[in-house]
Image: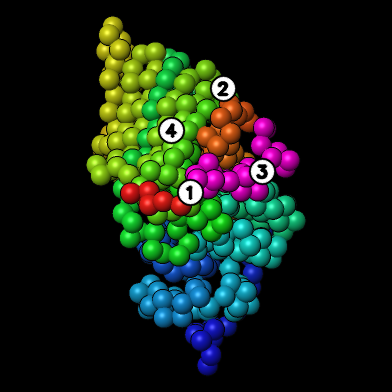
Amino acid sequence: MTDSEITTIRRGEAFAPGASSRVFTAEKPLRVGVVGTGGIAAAHARAVASLDGRARVVGACDIDVDRVRDFQHTWDVPIGTTSLEELLEAVDLDIVHLCSPPGSHKQQAVTALRRGIHVLSEKPPALSLAELDEIAAAEAAGGAWFATVSQHRFGSRALWLRDRVADGALGRPLTGVCNTLWYRPDSYFEVPWRGKWEVEGGGPTMGHGIHQLDTMLSILGPWAEVVAVAARQARPVATEDVSHAILSLDNGAVVSVVNSLLSPRETSYLRFDFEYATVELEHLYGYTDDSWRITPAPGHEEQVAAVWAQGPSGTGTASGHAAQFAAILTAIEHGEPLPVTLPDARTTLELIAGIYASAFTGTRIHPGDIDNASPFYRTMAGNGAPWDAQPEHDPR
């Protein structure tokens, strides 16, 4: 048996993509394949295992044969290979979870989608808008759905707040804060694909702040304009290690954004200032109902208290992969697009491209400005970061 033939099982009947009214059970679960068996793959396997047997990881692949074997042993996965193509030949899958480095996502997604297999990709789903549009073309051709992991959308209080924005119970959204203040030491970037435009796609704006940005947009709605700055302050990287941006949204709200890998007191912080109340969420990598708080505006205490009491409090759904996976399972059963869809992901990725474009060109960027004639369509670096033209120096 070769390394690429670690384990084999008899293949079953494939589930036709786009079919509806299939009910997944412990006897006939959703068949999941995991691509890349590093740290985040364990979170995927754990979340799949939480779905009452209605989904099962039946195959995995990784270029590191020992790592995929360890993953198989830990999570009782019957199939293991060292390439996606071999995995797809070895077992019929309903969905592929991309837990590989970002530079691999586009080609792996296209490969699976062209075979009519659904794809769920870790963030960022692609390195550029051009790559995401290639994925969209493959989705349309193959008949399966593509979704991006955006687990912070699915906590119960975030879902509740989205509805309050829609019904206006807290008044108009006026301003807000969207901060990803994390810390990564120099040693973090010893992993070969980190800190490089061509394989990670960008720095904290792309790879870390994407979750808070996506959650903020999912609650407040589309963006209308961005102006930004970015810098490489301290880390041994080609990308930025900090960025600041000011967003104007379609609904008129103005939001300040900071994405950093230089912040020893780490936090993920979202703040929404409405006419009648301030709503805040502070956590690090995941939240519960207790991570949220509300402060009423003077004169609106009783009204706001009544609205807040109607939402979840301590017993709702926490953010996390399991919440999104449950929603995906339901969507597949009903033959519906998987949350979070390609158009959803593109809105967020276009904003990230806009932050880089504004920071590197000194201009205000609007949706649609980054078309296929723009250098920022094919890479977040555009024609190159400003520090690329500076003499080599130790950023520390």
Mark 2 and mark 1 lie on one chain; the one further toward the N terminus is: 2
Q: Residue 391 carries which label?
A: 1
Residue at the spot 50% in from the left edge and 56% down from the top edge: 196
* Secondary-structure class at tag 3: helix
Nearer-the-camera pick, 330 or 109 = 109
User: Magenta span has 275?
Assistant: no
Displayed quadrant of residue 301: top left
Spatial CA span between label 2 and label 1: 41 Å
Q: Does the magenta stretch include residue 389?
A: yes
Q: Mark 1 and mark 3: span between their CA atoms?
A: 23 Å
For disc 4, the marked residue is 244
Dots 3 and 4: beta carbons under 8 Å?
Answer: no
Foreground: 184 or 77?
184
Secondary structure under badge 4? Answer: strand
Badge 4 density bin: few <14, some 14–19, many ≥20, Cα 10 Å? some
Question: Amino acid under label 1?
Answer: Pro
| Mark pair 3, 4: CA separation | 21 Å
| Above-or-below relation of 205 to 60 | above
Would residue 213 be found to the left or right of residue 104 on screen?
left
| Predominant SS of the magenta segment | loop
Name the residue tied to disc 2: 250
What stretch of residues is rendered in magenta? 368-391
| Residue reaching furthest to the front | 391
Q: Can residue 55 be seen in this view?
A: no
- Residue at numbered disc 3: 375
How crowded pointer 3 is (Cα within 10 Å; few <14, some 14-19, many 20+) is rated as: some
In this rendering, the label closer to the viewer, 4 or 2: 4
Q: Nearer the viewer, mark 1 or mark 3?
A: 1
In the rendered structure, which disc, 3 or 4, sits on the residue that comes first in sequence?
4
Q: Distance between the residues labelled 4 and 1?
A: 24 Å
